[in-house]
Image (cartoon, grey):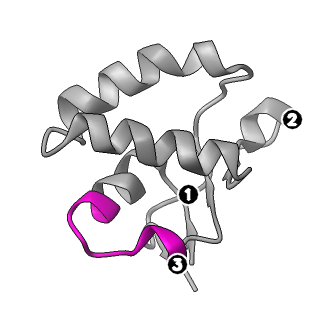
Amino acid sequence: MIGLSISLCIQEILEGKVKEEDVEWIIAGTSVDNLSGWAPVIKEYSETYWKKDPDEAEQILIRLISKQKILQPRLSGMPAPNISNGIWRR
């Protein structure tokens, strides 16, 4: 599966709606170019989207980053993905 939103896709993984191992990659709207830059993003998402288990959500994100499964088109000057038709593509 291809996700189009880090916050919402990880939320659905936390809720058991999607298995982490089924994620091919997530195309994100973020623009973070180094690991330390993720701290404010994690803080914001943990307070809004990942309240169920913010620590596990952070671990999921770190695993996906380490497996190079997070794509950030905004880092290359391209637009963020459009989620108006849903956050998952098969």
Residue designated by label 1: 82
Residue 80 seen in this snapshot:
no
> Decide: marks 2, 3 in contact (CB < 8 A)?
no
Q: Residues within 10 Å of mark 1 (few under 14, many from 20)?
A: few
**What separation in Å lies between label 2 and label 3 (alpha carbons)?**
26 Å
| Residue displayed at 45% across by 67% down | 20
Is residue 47 shown left or right of residue 85?
Answer: left
Residue designated by label 2: 76
| Residue displayed at 60% across by 15% down | 37
Q: Does 84 sit above or below residue 31? A: below
* Residue 27, image x, y percentages: 64, 54
**What separation in Å lies between label 1 and label 3 (alpha carbons)?**
21 Å
Q: Does 48 sit above or below residue 81? A: above
Q: Secondary structure at mark 1?
A: loop
Dot 3 amino acid type: Asp
Q: Does 4 sit above or below residue 58? A: below
Q: Report the disc number at residue 22.
A: 3
* Residue 16 among magenta residues: yes
Q: Which of the two labelled residues, at mark 2 and mark 3, occupies the earlier sequence position?
A: 3
Dot 2 amino acid type: Ser
Q: Residues within 10 Å of mark 2 (few under 14, many from 20)?
A: few
> Decide: marks 1, 3 in contact (CB < 8 A)?
no
* Residue 76 among magenta residues: no
* Residue 38, image x, y percentages: 54, 22
Q: Residues within 10 Å of mark 3 (few under 14, many from 20)?
A: few
Is residue 80 shown left or right of residue 88?
Answer: right
Q: Nearer the viewer, mark 2 or mark 3?
A: 3
Which quarter of the picture shows residue 65?
Answer: top right
**Quick one: which residue is furthest to the right in this view?**
76
Residue 56 seen in this snapshot:
yes
Q: Nearer the viewer, mark 1 or mark 3?
A: 3
Dot 1 amino acid type: Asn
